Amino acid sequence: MNYFPDEVLEHIFDFVTSQRDRNSVSQVCKPWYKIESSSRQKVFVGNCYAISPERVIERFPGLKSITLKGKPHFADFNLVPHDWGGFVHPWIDAFARNNMGLEELKLKRMVISDDSLELISRSFANFKSLVLVSCEGFSTDGLAAIASNCSFLRELDLQENDVEDHRGHWLSCFPDTCTSLVSLNFACLKGDVNLAALVRLVARSPNLRSLRLNHAVPLDILQKILMRAPHLVDLGVGSYVHDPDSETYNKLVTALRKCKSVKSLSGFLEAAPQCLPAFHLICPNLTSLNLSYAPGIHGTELRKLIRHCRKLQRLWILDCIGDEGLEVVAATCKDLQEIRVFPSDPFVGNAAVTEVGLVALSSGCPKLHSILYFCQQMTNAALITVAKNSPNFTRFRLCILDPTKPDAVTNQPLDEGFGAIVQSCKGLRRLSMSGLLTDQVFLYIGMYAEQLEMISIAFAGDTDKGMQYLLNGCKKLRKLEIRDCPFGNAALLMDVGKYETMRSLWMSSCNVTLGGCKSLAKKMPMLNVEIINETDQMDISADDEQKVEKMFLYRTLAGRRKDAPEFVWTL
Amino acid sequence: MGRGAASSSSSSFESSSYPSVSSESSFPQLKRDLSTDLRLGLSISTSQQDTPSTPSEQLSDWPPSKPFPRKALESEENECSSSTLFVKVYMEGIQIGRKLNLLAHDGYHDLIQTLDQMFNTNILWPEMDVENSGHCHVLTYEDKEGDWLIVGDVPWEMFLPSVRRLKITRADSL
C-alpha cells in the first residue's frame, strides 16, 4: 500500500476507530506511523503519569479528544491518601500553550481545579464535551466558567465527583444563546441549583437527550422539565419525595405519558415509594435502570417496578432487593446483560443477597455477561452452576461482605467455584474475588484465564506461589491490585519484565519489603515504583527488612513524577 | 468498585454501633493483625486488642464500594424504609373502623376484593356490571383537599398519593 498517496491512507485509517487498532496500524511501518499519528483525533491515556503531555502533543498534533485516568482504582475505597496526585493541570496547560483544538475531555480519578476549568473554557473555542468521573478539586465556580464561555457545549457530565458547592448560579451562566446541550448530568452536586434557570435551559435545548438532576430538584420542577423535554432518552430523577399534592402528581403522570423515548432511568435520590407507580408508564421501554442511590425503594415496590421492565439490559441496584427480588429480575428481564448489586447500609434489615440470587440470575438471563455482586455468602456449588449456565461472562466481580468467608455450606475455600468460572468463561477480562481462597485458585486462574486483563484480590492466598501462578499464567494481564495477601518479595521479583507489559500493580498490606521494592526499582528503570508512607514509621534510611504498607508501580516513559507529595517516595 | 455504605460491616458480627474509624497511627497495625487472623481462618474476636469493637468494623476500606453519596442519605433511610400506606376504612353505620395497607394491593380490583372480605359485602365501582342491586355498597375516599370522591375514576397510580381515607357507603344513600 506504499504507493497510495497519503490522503488515501488517511482516509482508510479514518475507518479504524479503536485505539488498539490504531496502535497496531502505527506499528506497521514508518510512513503509516506518521500518517496515523498526524490524523489521530482521539487518544486514551490509561495512566496520566505514563507519558508526558508534551510527548502526546508532539505525536498527535490533530488531537481533539482525550481521556485521562489518574489515581489507582483502590483510591475509590479510601486506600489512597488525599493529595496523592492525578493533577490534570499540566495537561490543560500544555494543550492551551500549543493551541490544540481540544473538543472533548474525559477524566477519571483526577484532580482538576477551578483554574483549570477556567483555562479550558477560554482556550478551546470548539470545546464540546466535559466528562468528569470520580474527580475532585473543583467547585461550582469552575462549572460556571465552563457554562459561561463554552459556546458550543454539548455535554457536561459529572459522575460521582466531590464538588465544592458554592451555591453559585452556575446554571444561570449558560447564556441565552447556548442551545446546543445534548447531555447534562449534575446528580452529584450537593447544593441547590437555580431551578428557574434550569427550566429555561431545558426549554432552549432542543437537542437535549440526557438529563440527570440532583437531589435539589423537586417533583414539580421535574414535571415542568419533562413537559419541555419529551424527547429525553436518559433521565436521572433528583428528588422524588414524599407528599406532592395531587395536582402536581397528576401533571407529572401526564408529562411522563408523553416521554416515549426514555430508555435509561436513574436517581431517585430521595424517594417516596407510593409515588413510584407513575414510572410504571416508562418501565416497558427501559433498557437501563440505576436505583443504586435509592435506599427508599425496595421490597414490594421495587419488585412491582421491575416486573414492568421487560426490556432491561442493564440494572444497578442495592442488595435490599434480596434474593426474592433477584428472582423477579431473572424471570422478567430476559435481555439482561449487566447487573450490579451494591451493598446497602447495614442498618436496614437483613435483606442482603446470597448465592441463591446469583444462581437465579445466571439461570434466567442468558445474555448476562457482566456482574458486580456484593453478597452475604457464597458456595462452590453455586459458582459451579453459574459457570455452567453462563460461559459468556466478560466481567465477574464478586464481593462477600465478610472477606474470608468460606463456602457457606461446606466450609471449604471457594477455590473450586472460582476455578470453574475461569475455566468456563473463556472470554473473561475482569475478575474480582473474595471469600476464603488458597493458592489453588491462583493456579486455576493462571491456567485458564487467558484473556484476563484486570484482577482484584483481597485477603486471599497462602504463599508467594499464588501471585506467581497469576503472573506466569495470565499473558494479557494489565492491571493487578492486591491487598492483605501473604505475597512477598519472591513473588514480586520473580518476573520483573512482566511489569513492563502491564499498566500497573498495586500491593498493600502484603509481605513485600522495602528492600524488595528497591531491588525491583533498580532492575527496572522504566517503572516508577512508588511507596506510600502515611505513618512516620518508615523513612529513607529505614531497614530494608521492613514491610511496605502500600506500593504502587507503573510503567512510564515520563520518568519519576515531579508532583509527588511528601508521603510518596519513588524508589 | 461501586457505591454503597460509608462504613464497612458484616452481618456475621454482632454490634449495635459503628464507631468512627480509629486514628491513623494505630490503623495500619490493626489491619495487619486482622489479616493474619483472617488468613489463619480464626474467627474475629473482640479480645485481640483493647478496642471495643471488632476489627472488621474499623476497616473503612471494606467492603470495596464507594461511600458517595450514601452519607447524605443515611438519615433519609429511616423515613423511607417502610413501603406501606395504611389508611382508615369505615363502613357506614359502623363506628369502629379498620385499617388497610393500600400498597399491598396491585390495583382497584385487588382492593375491592380485600374490602369485600373484610366487611362481608359487595362493593360496586364504576367499571363493574351491576347484577344484584340489593345489599350493595359503594367505595368512596377522602382526598388531600378534603373532598369525598368515588373510588375508581382515576388511574391507580394517581389514586395512591391522593387518598387519605376510605369509606364504604350504601349505594342507595348516594
Image (cartoon, coloured by chain):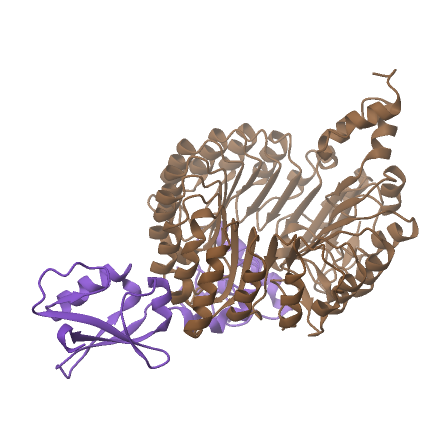
- Residue nearer the viewer, A466 or A422: A422
Is residue A203 visible to us here? yes
Residue A346 coordinates in the image, percent (x, y): 44, 64
Query: Please, is residue A29 above or below residue A253 in the view?
Result: above
B69 left or right of B105 in image? right
Chain letter, purple:
B
Query: Please, is residue B91 above or below residue A423 in the view?
Result: below
Query: Please, is residue A314 above or below residue A242 in the view?
Result: above
Residue A211 coordinates in the image, percent (x, y): 60, 57
Name the residue at 59% across, 31% down: A451
Name the residue at 18% across, 62% down: B113
Residue A136 coordinates in the image, percent (x, y): 71, 62
Quarter of the image with the N terminus of chain A in it? top right
- Residue nearer the viewer, A214 or A349: A214
B170 left or right of A457 in image? left
Name the residue at 53% across, 58% down: B62
Residue A530 coordinates in the image, percent (x, y): 75, 50
Is residue A407 visible to us here? no
Query: Please, is residue A10 above or below residue A478 in the view?
Result: above
Q: Quadrant of residue B153?
A: bottom left
Chain letter, brown:
A
A529 left or right of A352 in image? right
How many badges with numbers are in the image?
0
Q: Quadrant of residue B16?
A: bottom left
- Residue nearer the viewer, B133 or A327: B133
Name the residue at 77% across, 54% down: A152
